[in-house]
Image (cartoon, helix red, strand yellow):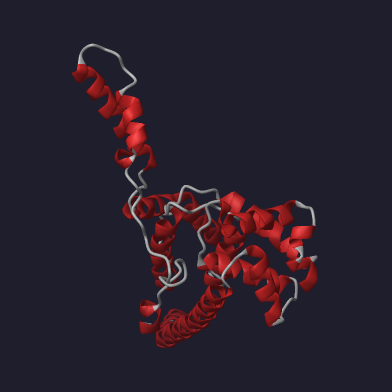
Amino acid sequence: MATVASLSLSTLTQSSSERKTPLPSLLSDSSTFKLRTNFSFHPITIRSYSASRFIVRCMSTLTEPPPVADTKLKFLNAYKRPIPSIYNTVLQELIVQQHLMRYKKTYRYDAVFALGFVTVYDQLMEGYPSDEDREAIFQAYVNALNEDPQQYRADAQKLEAWARAQDANSLVDFASKTGECEDILKDIAERAGGSGSFSYSRFFAVGLFRLLELANATEPTILEKLCAALNINKKSVDRDLDVYRNLLSKLVQAKELLKEYVEREKKKREERSEPQKANEAVKNFLAENLYASK
């Protein structure tokens, strides 16, 4: 079980070229501050100053991200049943890393990111004892990040269905076509090209990989063309997909160890119960014969 304890997802959710950056304080925005202080023409200066401080403080509070502890607590409060350690260890680290990514200044939700997260989550939780609990954990996890689990699932399914109907050429040529999924990719390409907020992550890379997989576009050149069309750095995607494949390999090994452990413990319990069953049978036999002889 040492393998399980050492398993880490810290490299999955955040690109190595990215680091958490503090949100800029509204107090540094001199134009906003001057607008508020000059708004009042009340002859008593101190009242104008107090009102300004109050307004700025409220605005700052609205943009301040919640602490990681709050997100973890929301998850634990939403799903209170015990989670086996092989899953819980990874989930707890994963939610911390995704919290940091979720509240980055440049973060903006998109469907490819959702597809990547859903793919990782489903593969991580594959083999979980209960399908109902697996979905309940998913709901609690995404809600804890103040996002919509139904939207994650719906967008992932929508992209999966679209990708299955594509081939290598049509997948790359999304910019020349019309449609809901094509528009999603166009928006990503526009933002990634520098005209809007875009925060690359390894979930996004996994989402791209899933699109290629479903379209049976396995040629390495197709990934290069798709990255170019989306204005994404292919080297980052290649590196992150290597991390993803390595993670899946470790998860498979950990689950195999867990399966062997469970089976071994089950066998031990059965072996311990055999003598007890034999003793009970002997007692019952003797009791029945003694009663019959009287």
Q: Is residue 241 in view from this perspective?
A: yes
In this rendering, position of residue 22 left or right of residue 257? left
Q: In the picture provided, is 147 more to the left or to the right than 86?
A: right
The residue at the point 37 percent across, 47 percent down is 65
Residue 275 at x, y percent in the picture: 41, 88
Picture quarter containing residue 69? bottom left
Residue 177 higher or lower than 209, as above or below: above
Q: Quadrant of residue 221?
A: bottom right
Task: Between residue 265 and residue 75, name the one nearer to us.
Answer: 75
Percent x, y of residue 13: 46, 66
Q: Residue at x 42, y 80 (%)?
A: 287
The answer to whether residue 167 is visible is no
Residue 148 vs 252, above or below: the answer is: above
Write the residue at 42% across / 60% down.
Answer: 95
Q: Looking at the rendering, in which quadrant would you find the N terminus? A: bottom left
Residue 14 in the image: state x and y as whole percent: 44, 66
Instruction: Pick the residue in front: 71 or 226.
Output: 226
Q: Nearer the viewer, residue 254 or 48?
A: 48
For residue 227, above or below residue 21: below
